[in-house]
Image (cartoon, rainbow, N blue to C red):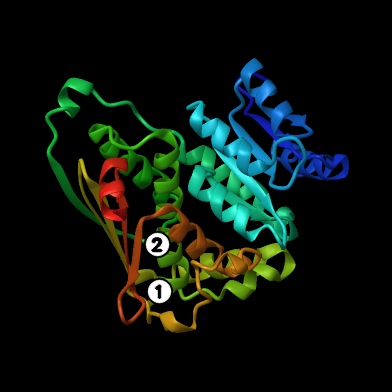
Amino acid sequence: MTNQVRILVVDDSATQRILLESHLKSGGYDIHTAGDGVEALECIQRELPDMVVTDLQMPNMDGLQLVREISEQQIDVPVILTTAAGSEIIAAEALHAGAASYVPKSALATLLLPTVVRILELRKASQPNQQLADCLGSVSIQWHLTNDQSLVPDLIRRVEAILNEFGVYDSSQHMQIAMALDESITNAIVHGNLEINSDLRDIDNGQPYVDEINRRMTLPPYCDRRVLFRIQADRNNATFTIRDQGPGFCVDKVADPTDMANLENVSGRGLLLINAFMDEVSHNEGGKEIVMVKYCDNTADEVST
């Protein structure tokens, strides 16, 4: 098959490599494997994969060290972590170091393929005209989105094209922004406007979850609601505002998304990624709006000091 997506699976356990390979091959991907981070870097240097899926705890070079090496060598490849209970601290460091996402090992069967597909969709971005881009000062745009989730990747690619004009984020930061936007906009649609209960994902491989989304897409009042998305950006930072028209939620009752002890909770995975990837995250009092800020490197250094 030509143009087949190539994925490198990294895990010191042969059993786990076989399991991951089985899940990914069902998606039609070309799978290669490595036993640790050192071997993975050798594979990457021989032929750049389209994606890396790696365990965290391995001998010789663990997943965190691998993510750092990929970032330091400016290798343009997204990395997905597979996480287990007890790996919370190292997972948090790896996400901040540049990993694109994570999937709990307890949820590989349901989350791995959708995560791979989403990241590959979000990597499709156009390159700017640099001479024109250098003239750009600031941008403020807003959209009023329907509940059609198929619009989300195209919207994010549009946002990525805008941010590319400024040239202040590297490829890893662009992927982090894309993942945070994907999680937050999808959450506003599914859990905000359509009021879908996350527990439905745990029944019959998530089919009732999908069925209820499709049902409410044409059922008032859900189908009449919209999601406001606004980007305000310049060469110092980008601020993203997302507001749904659902009933909202009690922010205080949500498991702390900044606490990596909640890493294995699939239901809180989106907020955890958002908080790991964005520099500032806040919700309004009614839980209908989230505001996220991503600083460029120079600005982030000034803010931290």
Image coords of residue 117 (percent x, y): 58, 43
Residue at point 44%, 53% (across, down) = 277
Q: Horizontally, is 20 left or right of 212 in the view?
A: right
- Say which amino acid is labelled 1: Tyr
Q: Horizontally, is 172 left or right of 255 in the view?
A: left
Image coords of residue 223 (percent x, y): 39, 70
Residue at point 48%, 64% (across, down) = 271
Q: CA distance from mark 2 to mark 1?
A: 9 Å
Q: Hey, which quadrant is residue 264 in on the image? A: bottom right
Is residue 29 at least partly visible in the picture?
no
Residue at point 25%, 49% (across, down) = 302
Image coords of residue 121 (percent x, y): 49, 39
Q: Which mark is residue 147?
A: 2
Residue at point 63%, 68% (across, down) = 265
Q: Residue furthest right?
A: 15
Q: Is residue 218 above or below residue 273?
A: below
* Residue that mark 1 sits on: 222
